[in-house]
Amino acid sequence: MPETFSSRTVAIVALASLLAGFVVVFAGGMLLFAPATTVPQAPPLGPDAGARVAAPSPAQVDAGEAPVVVEPSEPAEAGAPAAAEGAVRFAPSAVSRCWDANNPAVLPGATCDRLQAIDDHFASKAAEIAGCARGHGRLAFIMDLRFSTGFVRSWGGPSSTIANAGTVVACVRRVTQPLPLAAAAHAHDRYLMVLPIDW
């Protein structure tokens, strides 16, 4: 004898089936039409190509955020020769902030000493760095250095105009490691500095 169901049971089963079908279709549609994650690219060469990078605040540094671009306060060096094909040129590095050991107080760049040993180290690796990029452009190579722990972090600033800036940063980082922190004269423990590199 066939089993009979009450109209209430039939209605509940139908409603549950409809709800389950809606969830499956809706969730599948959301996955299908979810926007793709975009990877930030280096900004194109434009009128701000000569802009300088302002180092981020300590909170931005700790959060891994990129620094912002500020307009240059002084003109580029007059009569500076253009880099030849396959050559590389370094502008003097600029320390924008520094910190003393075990002291969270931020010291402005004007009171920080320059790390000449880091500039000299990069100059000694010019041939290897020259091979990191194709074409012409600038990389604002930003470094966060801590002498007490040997911590080094680096990234490209948003004013970089060199093509494939992320790949170039990774190459420069690779060919310049290890940095000579043990031999570098320094008055403070941590530095945030920018080294402009032109190809």
Image: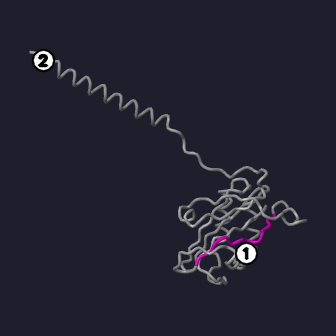
What residue lies at 64% left-to-right and 60% top-to-bottom? 67
Residue sitting at 77 percent across and 55 percent down?
A: 49
Residue occupied by mark 1: 119
Screen quadrant of the N terminus = top left
Q: Nearer the viewer, residue 117 or 176?
A: 117
**Which residues lie in the magenta part?**
87-99
Q: Secondary structure at mark 1?
A: helix
Sequence-first disc among 2 and 1: 2
Q: Is residue 30 above or below residue 56?
A: above
What secondary structure characterizes most of the magenta part? strand
Residue 165, horizontal then vertical, whole percent: 68, 56
| Of 71 and 53, the residue lying toward us | 71
Q: Amino acid at mark 2?
A: Thr
Residue 4: numbered disc? 2
Quadrant for residue 18, please give it. top left
94 inside magenta stretch: yes
The residue furthest left is 1
In this rendering, which labeled residue sits more in front, label 2 or label 1?
1
Q: How far is disc 2 from disc 1 in space, using C-alphas?
A: 87 Å
Disc 1 residue type?
Asp
Does residue 189 sit above or below 76 in this rendering? below
Dot 1 surroundings within 10 Å: few (below 14), some, or many (20 or more)?
some
Residue in the image at 53% along x and 65% along y: 62
